[in-house]
Image: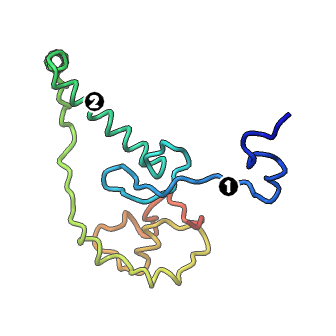
Amino acid sequence: MGPPENLTDHPENQAGRRKRSVRRPRARCCLLKGCGQRFHPQKANQRYCSAGCRKASRRWSRWKAQQRYRATKSGKEKRTDQSRRYRERIKSRQPAEPEPDNEGARVITPADFFRSFLRSAWLLRGLHPPAAKSLAALLLARLPPSDGARARKGAPLEAGANLSRRY
């Protein structure tokens, strides 16, 4: 038997050589319009830098395909049929019956009306009520009652508000 054809492939000649490391592809620019970020692809055909860019490109691709389809004759016909069916549905809807106006007119007071009666936040910081008080009783505790403000002397201002829990 003679010598091998390629002497460099012989195992005795390969003792001093190291194996080459796997070469990574060079950095690319993300192909999504407006991103342009440079990245090292993990796969050979990777075109986008992240999952968000891939998702955005798929969304744009679907939108573009829809635009191309609607430009065709059959796409225009389907779109007109869809619009016609929508207009028919709108016409066939029953009009809503007007609600009777049994209530009196609502009066919306301006926001600055109550501002003069409220305490500022730095005054409320020091107040720690021993028991649950209503919100109105806490905010309007030291204000003198005006005419018709209370039903009778000692009557509570508000019932049901529980301020014992801290938020």
> Could you say which quadrant of the image residue 151 lies in?
bottom left
- Residue depicted at 40% across the width and 53% down the height: 30
- Amino acid on which disc 1 is placed: Ser
Image location (x, y in percent) of residue 159: 48, 58
| Left or right: residue 2 compared with residue 76 | right
* Quarter the C terminus occupies: bottom right
* Quarter the N terminus occupies: top right
Disc 1 marks which residue?
A: 21
Image location (x, y in percent) of residue 23: 60, 53
The alpha-carbon separation of the residues under discs 2 and 1 comes to 43 Å
Q: Earlier in the sequence, mark 2 or mark 1?
A: 1
Image location (x, y in percent) of residue 86: 18, 20
Give above or below for 145 relative to 17. Answer: below
25 or 127, nearer to the observer: 25
Give above or below for 32 relative to 70. Answer: below
Q: How many C-alpha atoms fall within 10 Å of the one at disc 1: few (<14), some, or many (≥20)?
A: few
70 or 92, nearer to the observer: 70
Give above or below for 20 relative to 76. Answer: below
Give above or below for 135 relative to 96. Answer: below
SS for tag 1?
loop
Disc 2 marks which residue?
A: 65
